[in-house]
Amino acid sequence: MAEKILITGISGSGGSYLAEHIVNHQPDVEVHGIARWHSTTSKNNLSHISDKITVHECDLTDLSSVLRVMEKVQPDGIFNLASHANVRACFDTPLSVLQNNIFSTANLFEAVRLLKLDSVIQHCSTSEVYGQVDPKNIPIQEDCPINPSSPYAVSKTTQDFLGYTYFLNFGVKIIRTRMFSYINPRRDDLFATSFALQVARVEAGLQDKLRHGNLDSVRTLIDVRDAMESYWVAYKKCTPGEIYNLGGDQVIKVGEFLDVLKKLAKTKIHSEVDPALFRPTDVTLQIPDTSKFEKETGWKSQYSFEDSVEFLLNHCRMRAAAEKRALL
């Protein structure tokens, strides 16, 4: 029988890229996904592979709904990517983020336990759990103290602890990964995509200048295609119960990334600070140590920083062109 994979949040940016990656690189794998009822992102993000995947509508915050889908699919592997993931927005609706992210993951783990499934779960967490790290702990290793500084980060930390609890007490095979920043053309709220889309819109005459928030934070970037491959490799080769940092090696200030895009722009880009784009608290230093993951799996990134920026800009320019055509 074909190996069956279930991706929660399959219609979102990360989930759709992962589904696309598996379809393209693991053609013998049967890909299933969970999406919210009437998901608004399914059409845009999954239309090009809709005939190669099976999407199940499900409310992850409702255990009975999760049990129904899990019993039907009986997946060999699960990638848990469903999440309210907009860090800046989480300060406006903290309780909604906490309730959604914590209970959806708890229900997923509990469904696997109740149904006695032998699924391997790759719980896809985030570097946000580390919070503001003391410079002496850079690069960040997996045993770095956790210090979440936003409602979103608190929810992801709780998910992380739930994963270890279900592994330790119930034997659920949960691998926890903490992904650092990746260049994701389908996430407009991320600084890289926001900047690139605004550059493309200025080039197309759709806006006058680029608006930004904090430019001093340091991030370590990886191509979305490399990020998805690292998720797959972690699922296949990593050890349940363990934690692994995932990410790239391109260390760059947010402002430096903006400068790169300005140099590649087809017209002069004027920019200004928008106070609304600042977070109440910001994690300013994110540089990972991914040696544990690389030593255990042999994984290496394939795409250069230049490849990633080109991929991002091409995507955003196509979107801007489509937006301009719609106005004609």
Image: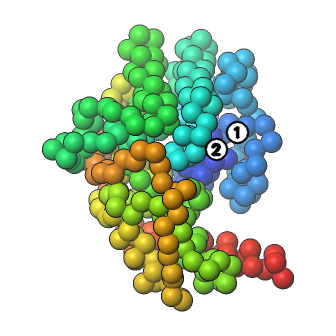
**In the image, farthest residue toward the front:** 275
Which numbered circle lies on residue 35?
1
The percent coordinates of residue 7 (x first, y second) are 60, 39
Q: CA distance from mark 2 to mark 1?
A: 6 Å
Q: Badge 1: how crowded within 10 Å, few (<14), some, or many (20+)?
A: many
- Give residue 315's quadrant in the image: bottom right
130 vs 99: above or below = below
Which amino acid type is marked by label 2? Answer: Ile
Residue at x-position 53% and y-position 47%: 88
Q: Amino acid at mark 1?
A: Ala
Residue 79 is at least partly visible in this image: no
**Vertical arrangement, residue 227 with respect to residue 320, above or below:** above
Residue 17 x %, y %: 57, 54
Q: Is residue 64 visible?
A: yes
For label 1, the SS is strand
**Which of the pair 162/176 is nearer the observer?**
162
Q: Is residue 73 left or right of residue 273?
A: right
| Mark toward the start of the polypeptide (2 vs 1) | 2
Instruction: Name the residue that disc number 2 marks.
Output: 10
Q: What residue is drawn where x is 40% and y is 48%?
A: 282
Which image quarter is the C terminus in?
bottom right
Q: Is residue 187 left or right of residue 229?
A: right
Asked if marks 2 and 1 touch (Cβ < 8 Å), the reply is: yes
Secondary element type, mark 2: loop
